[in-house]
Amino acid sequence: MKKPSDKQLGMHHTITRRDFVQGAAVAIGAAAQAGTLSLSQTATASASVSEVAQGAMPADYPPIKTGMRGSHSGAYEIAHALAREGAEFPKPEPIQEHYDLIVVGAGISGLAAAHYYQQQFGPDAKILLLENHDDFGGHAKRNEFHQSGDMVLSLGGTHNLEWWSFSDNVEAFMAAHGVDPELMRKQMDFAYGRDAPNSPAMWFDQETYGVSRLVTNFNLSAKLTSDDIDKIPISDAGRASLNRFYGSAPHLEDWTEAEAEDTLSSISYPDFLRQYGGLTEDAVQLFNKEEHGSWGLEMRALSAAEAIWEGYPGAHLFGEGWSEDSFGYPVAMWPDGNASLARLMVAKLMPHSAPDVTADNVAIARFDYSALDQKGADVRLRLNSTVIGVENTDEGVSVTYASPSGALKKVSARHSVLACYHSIIPHLCPAMADTQKAALKYQVKFPMILTNVLLRNSEALDKLGVDAVACPGRLHARLFLFKGLHTGGYERPDSVEEAVSLVFWGSISPPENAIDLRSQLRGSRQKLLDLSFEDFEREVRTVLDGLLGPAGFEVSEDILAITVNRWPHGYSYEYMQLWDPEWAPGEAPHEIGRQRFGSIVIANADAGASAYTHVAIDQAHRAVADLLDDT
């Protein structure tokens, strides 16, 4: 079976000028002189708007830009020049602006730090937030689609509230912003693709497995039957090894608890499957990308203990029974993920940018981005501004940043909160002690991708009876329909005829020769940065053609828009059994790295070594509390 050509995949399928302007919201007529553009051209045009008309056009509304988002063009090049190449910059231009607080990074933690600073130092405190991206929220990225006429929202990054883990501080924070997770739970039916009659499912692609085959009601973490295993297109030996593994009688039950703990915590899960489960290489490969979405890691980065704790098979070899996850991960969620939480924070900090916004209407509210950096406002948010230096002074701090025009500016403040990636801070603060800089550099973020595809309708998926599919042989490990959320005032009809977002979720497999975890993460990051939007578009079209084509999906006609949320620096580093020692209290890298440095304090989920929104908020609270000695 020949691979479909780019033409057959619709790679050069044109969209109307009206769709382009509606979807990209970029009033640059010269880019559309021919009247039609491909999705790839649309992505390029929309991504470059900050270079040609930053802040000058009312239609420049970042959430509706398609193409390459997340770490988009213009957001990271200066930081890479500083950190990777040791670039030296010309002398900045001092500007006559002085603040009580300058926050580096307008993600969840940076916005929360501004909130807590107002609480501790007064509601009239003058605050400036500097953000290198063209939108606020950090990884809580909002994706809006309008190509179908009505607005369709989707996930761009951080996307749920683990309300059962909230501290008292976070509970109070949510209450102050009108967020009620219990009510949100009642307003959503979304369950990460566990609703359709034939889900979960796994798709084996022609290129990898020699056959295109969708296997429904299939879950590697459940007890597979011989009938299930017979449908898997791997070798006879591989299927036989899976039959033995899933049907195996306990043969490790004579291990003591200590022996089991020592062994399982010191061996990777794939090695456990090989050595103690007897699986062949092609059988082990089925598991490799299972945690690309949730953890952002290849399975070889997890210990056997961590994987089994996550629910992957193996406990039955010790005599434990098979069981379903009764917890079900009951998150609360908005239709744009935690971007709505960031919007609530911005509306509270800068009410002039979004009047009358509440938790009941935040998902459908329009924000005036031209008002974010309003002169004279107590809180100002400056986008497309990459910080390159933060230093302590006799009066507090000075902060140097590259402005949207490219000119270097210097501003001053009493305090600064660094709510940016830990790994960049040593380059921003070269005067910091080597011990602290080394601790900050220890934490390498886990890459993450969320590629949103606006489908004309979900008829093909409904015909197949699936709403979530694992793709072990493809770039994205998993895809799922994103619908069933009615929070924040957003309503979408639950009809197979309506346009819907299909989310491709995962990470990037590291190079085979990357052994230790940090090498794996850096290798995955570089592979991600090397991929163009066209690479992602071709991958998406190839998958949907093979998966949904047999159910009537026309890949050249039924894809309305594609947005790639690329996060080379994605999930915060969490300590892993195979790669990190057990640190004594106070001696872990994140604890050393987040220590106060003069008038500079450090926040973000990195500072809690845990990739969750509530951790980012808790760390903002801690960071601002570190400044109270100055009162």
Image (cartoon, rainbow, N blue to C red):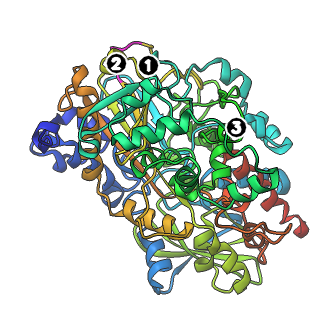
Amino acid marked by disc 3: Glu
Q: Residue at x 72, y 45 (%)?
A: 614
Image quadrant containing the N terminus:
top left
Mark 3 packing: few (<14 Cα in 10 Å), some, or many (20+)? Answer: some
Look at the magenta stretch and give its main secondary structure: loop
Q: Earlier in the sequence, mark 3 or mark 2?
A: 3
Amino acid marked by disc 2: Leu
Q: Give the camera-side residue of 471 and 400.
A: 471
Q: Between marks 1 and 3, how big is the CA–CA gap?
A: 27 Å
Mark 1 packing: few (<14 Cα in 10 Å), some, or many (20+)? Answer: some
Q: Residue at x 46, y 23 (%)?
A: 217
Q: Is residue 218 left or right of residue 332?
A: left
Rendered view: 434 above or below 570: below
Secondary element at image label 2:
helix
Q: Give the camera-side residue of 127 and 517.
A: 517
Give coordinates of residue 127: x percent, y percent: 68, 59
Whether residues under marks 2 and 1 lie with C-beta atoms below 8 angstroms apart, the answer is yes
Query: Residue 416 occupies which quadrant of the picture?
Result: bottom right
Q: Which residue is disc 2 drawn over?
A: 464
Whether residues under marks 3 and 2 lie with C-beta atoms below 8 angstroms apart, the answer is no
Amino acid marked by disc 1: Asn
Q: Which residue is disc 3 drawn over?
A: 162
Q: Residue at x 24, y 45 (%)?
A: 207
Q: Which residue is disc 1 drawn over?
A: 198
Q: Residue at x 55, y 56 (%)?
A: 271
Q: Is residue 123 left or right of residue 543?
A: right
Q: Which residues are magenta?
A: 495-499
